[in-house]
Image: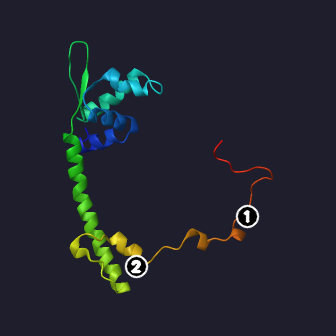
Amino acid sequence: MPDTLSRTFSALADPTRRALLARLRRGDATVTQLAEPFLGRMTLPGVTKHLKVLESAGLVTKGREAQWRPCTLNTEPLRDAAAWMAEYRIQMEESLDRLGEYLGTFTGTSTGTSTGTNTATEAAASASPAPSLAATTTSASTPDTTPPGDTDDRSR
């Protein structure tokens, strides 16, 4: 059985489930209310399966009020996922800051990482700007293979 963090990320991987969670951010809703926007693209049992995945991940809880099954958003697994990602974000920022300092030794510039406002990505971008695509290609190197009278009109 996967750990809770894996179940959370797995549940968040699907855009339909993320849309269901976004709807629940506005407040509790019944299964039928949650399914309404999706009924043109999927069946009610399909939406119910998505809700079961969210429920097994602990992101949604279902109650019971007479014949209704109101669903409620449970944010605790989202907080756990955010805390896990924050640890890696800090590590990556520190790594990028070190890269910026290293690149700064070649250009003779200081990245100002002591304030924490300048990232290494910004320092790397300012140290060596990337050449534009237009400057690296010529029209002679890309022959026109469009048949006569045929245009590339993607608005159709």
> Residue placed at 25% from the left, 20% from the top?
69
Vertical arrangement, residue 89 with respect to residue 17, above or below: below
> Residue placed at 31% from the left, 22% from the top?
31
As helix, strand or loop, the secondary structure at mark 1 comes to loop
Is 131 placed left or right of 94 in the picture? right
First in sequence: mark 1 vs mark 2: 2
Q: Residue furthest top?
A: 66
Q: Quadrant of the C terminus?
A: top right
Query: Which residue type does callout 1 highlight?
Result: Pro
Residue underneath mark 1: 143
Q: For residue 88, which quarter of the picture?
A: bottom left
What is the x, y in percent for residue 37?
A: 41, 27
As helix, strand or loop, the secondary structure at mark 2 comes to helix
What is the x, y in percent for residue 38?
A: 42, 27
Query: Which residue type does callout 2 highlight?
Result: Ala
Total number of numbered labels? 2
Q: For residue 71, which quarter of the picture?
A: top left
Residue underneath mark 2: 127
What is the x, y in percent for residue 51?
A: 31, 29
What is the x, y in percent for residue 151?
A: 73, 50
Q: Quadrant of the N terminus?
A: top left
> Residue placed at 27% from the left, 66% from the top?
93
Q: For residue 48, which quarter of the picture?
A: top left
Give the Cα distance between marks 1 and 2. Answer: 35 Å
